[in-house]
Amino acid sequence: MGSALENYVNQVRTLSATGNYRELADELPESLSLLVRNWSILDNVLETLDMQQHTLGVLYVILGKLHSVASSNPEPAQIIQLMRDFMQRSNTEQLRFAVCPFYETCHLFTDFLVQKNVSILGIKVLSRAIEQIRQLDTQLTPIHADLCQLSLKAKNFNLVLRYLDTDITDISTVAAECKNQQQQQPQHTLDANNDAKYFLLYYYYGGMIYTAVKNYERALYFFEVCITTPAMAMSHIMLEAYKKFLMVSLIVEGKIAYIPKNAQVIGRFMKPMASHYHDLVNVFGNSSSEELRILILKYSETFTRDNNMGLAKQVATSLYKRNIQRLTKTFLTLSLTDVASRVQLPSAVEAERYILNMIKSGEIFASINQKDGMVLFVDDPEQYNLPDMFLNVQTNITQVLDLVKQINKMEEEIILNPMYVKKALGSQDDDLASQHPKTYSGDPTD
């Protein structure tokens, strides 16, 4: 081991032994280039450090290894096992002094797994990373976006849904962490600039995951958050989310869901770049399944390029269902052949399949007489007087009350925030000045 690396090891050991983690965290970034240059002997460095006692030193060695994967071309199993061991044995107290490099390590690890096409092997590792670094169960970290990306690549959503189902009340960003720790290292500047990127990616990937599991209401909410995030310019992530937002809106509401008026970036940039999707919305509004099928075929190249062809087919399916639901408001009985004709399905067999699926999912209430091929539409049998329904209503009321408490708490924190108070008082001073302007006709000191 070279003398420079020996100095690195001695520095880590000395400052860790005396508990000077703040000083160590401030000095270690200067050694990152040294570690990257000596990638071939970093395993020797790891052998001299203990993950529990020297967490900060080991973190930067792993970061150096991940920065040099293009040169070292390590076996995925080696990197995965190293990360797994680190997440299990590292000292959380020390990691609090190096949150920014910890996030960077997780980003590079994610990129490595995606490149090697072994995303599924990193899902539990990143889940452990989130549990270790977040300070609240409702806190969003940049690692959440990495976990969503790996889950999408692996098509494995069991673990990530637990995080997506949790409503966010706090956000951890590189900029905030560096400010809290008073770190001004240049290498963290790029990640700080990417805070918005990881926020948008979390909601974009989350919307895609909910779409994949057919939880369209939750998917719509995630895409809405992504496209209505305050911005001066359009992000490509926001544009792709907007396209999916339009299609999921049709599935959930049959029209474009409400968009706040302050989301000016949508009208200015997104609409002109999503014209084919707005054509889809317009044709969907005509309630003609045949016209919609023709339009999807016409724009199939665009939908396929955007990876939205599967979603376009779901939109077509939802229109068939909506047209069947309309029939329940007009007719008490219909033959399967008539249903197929009125909603423009290819056959009575296909109409029967749709109706059976809709009955099973509770979208309509009907019965089919197999003997004469007739459908009998009935009213919703729910009387809303059973204990289970009462318990459901009570649960919803409790959730709303908890949400009100959370909103009041967040409002109080904002009102007492010194930056908000200063800005609010400054705005009031400006308003008073505009209401009582001074006119200086003589001495300006009068």
Image: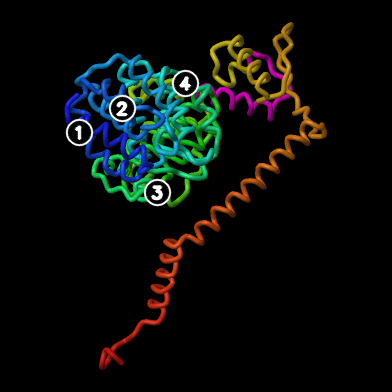
User: Residue 214 location, x and y as percent?
Assistant: 54, 24
- Neighbour tally class for label 1: few under 14, some 14-19, many 20 plus, Cα within 10 Å: few
Dot 1 falls on a residue whose secondary structure is: helix
Q: In this orientation, does residue 102 appear?
A: yes
Say which amino acid is labelled 2.
Ile
Q: Which residue is mark 3?
A: 230
Residue 183: in magenta span: no
> Which quarter shows the N terminus?
top left
Measure how far apart labels 3 and 2 are at the Cα level. 36 Å
In this picture, which residue range is highlighted in magenta?
313-338
Q: Which residue is mark 2?
A: 62
Q: Is residue 203 above or below residue 62?
A: below
Sooner in the amino-acid sequence: mark 2 or mark 4: 2
According to the image, what is the colour scheme of the structure?
rainbow
Which residue lies at the image location 41% right of the left edge and 22% below the top edge? 85
Name of the residue lying farthest toward the top: 371
In depth, the one of 114 and 215 nearer the eye is 114
Q: Is residue 395 left or right of residue 249?
A: right
Sooner in the amino-acid sequence: mark 1 or mark 3: 1
- Neighbour tally class for label 2: few under 14, some 14-19, many 20 plus, Cα within 10 Å: many
Q: Which residue is mark 1?
A: 33
